Amino acid sequence: LAKTTQPISMDSYEGQEVNITCSHNNIATNDYITWYQQFPSQGPRFIIQGYKTKVTNEVASLFIPADRKSSTLSLPRVSLSDTAVYYCLVGDGETGANNLFFGTGTRLTVIP
Amino acid sequence: NAGVTQTPKFQVLKTGQSMTLQCAQDMNHEYMSWYRQDPGMGLRLIHYSVGAGITDQGEVPNGYNVSRSTTEDFPLRLLSAAPSQTSVYFCASRRTAGGPVETQYFGPGTRLLVL
């Protein structure tokens, strides 16, 4: 089971780019890296997923180095509404169900 | 599509009482799961199902039962509630069970207080 390690919290000013790095040293060959966002009193929401190199969508970018032992979620020009907890997850490629195991996440606070 | 729905939104129980948390999805998803989230913590997997008639345990299954008689519904049963089960419960679903991990959709949560 691939565990992940993230910073517990980060602060950023509005308009800045935010990079949240996640460590997953024991990632398996079949595992994908997925990031979720959770606002207070809501369920997590999918942001982005990748396997290697770089993935970009309308919300964020995900950078994955060649060894895949870490990944970086990049949020461009954050706003106050990006204040949330961000979870990095690695799919359990050892079982057919590919269960997602959440860590404690990174609490991002965007400051005006 | 309503997505993933959960009822009730909030429930207060006394120790020893039983209840069922309801979860339904209208996306014809194969995989469904239940998580609990304690204050300041991440989500922990309780039980999951890879299809109708098939369920299995997650990280923290003790005190909870599940069944999956239809594709749409995945109820979570607390047989004898304990204060340690005070938490927010999230139900989630995704299109398939196996293969590369796909987007998982979460319900709005049920906030449970056990006195």
Image (cartoon, coloured by chain):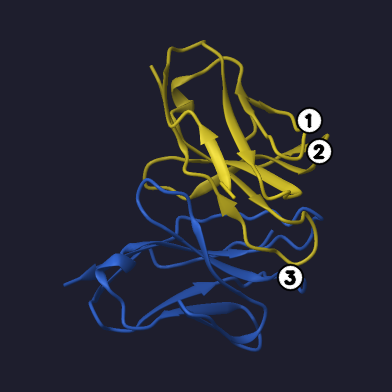
Residue placed most toward the observer, B38 or B110: B110
* Classed neighbour count for the residue bearing mark 2: other residues with Cα under 10 Å, few (<14), some (14–19), many (≥20): some
In the rendered image, the vertical position of residue B3 relative to residue A67, given as above or below: above
Residue B63 in view of the camera: no
Q: Is residue A8 left or right of residue B8?
A: left
> Can you name the residue that lies furthest to the left here?
A112
> CA gap, disc 1 to disc 3?
33 Å
The Cα–Cα distance between marks 3 and 2, rounded to whole angstroms, is: 28 Å
Res A34 → quadrant: bottom right
In the picture as drawn, the residue positioned furthest to the front comes out as: B1
Across and down, in percent, residue A28 comes to 73, 70
Q: Disc 1 on helix, strand or loop?
A: loop
Q: Residue at x 43, y 48 (%)?
A: B41
The CA span between labels 1 and 2 is 6 Å
Same chain for labels 1 and 2? Say yes or no.
yes
Locate residue A29, reporting x and y percent.
77, 74
Q: Badge 2 is on which residue?
A: B52
Residue depth check, mark 3 versus mark 2: number of the one nearer the observer: 2
Cβ–Cβ under 8 Å for marks 1 and 2: yes
Colour blue maps to chain: A
In the image, A67: left or right of A30? left
Circle 1 Cα neighbour tier, 10 Å, few/some/many (<14 / 14–19 / ≥20): few
| Residue pictured at 50% horizontal, 59% vertical | A45
Write down the residue under mark 1. Answer: B69
C-beta proximity under 8 Å, tags 3 and 2: no
Q: Tell me if residue A93 comes above or below residue B114 in the rendering.
A: below
Quadrant assignment, res A17:
bottom left
Tag nearer the camera, 1 or 3: 1
Counting from the top left corner in percent of width and height, residue B26 is at 66, 45
Closer-to-camera residue (B2/A66):
B2
Give the image quarter of residue B60: top right
Which hue belongs to chain B?
A: yellow
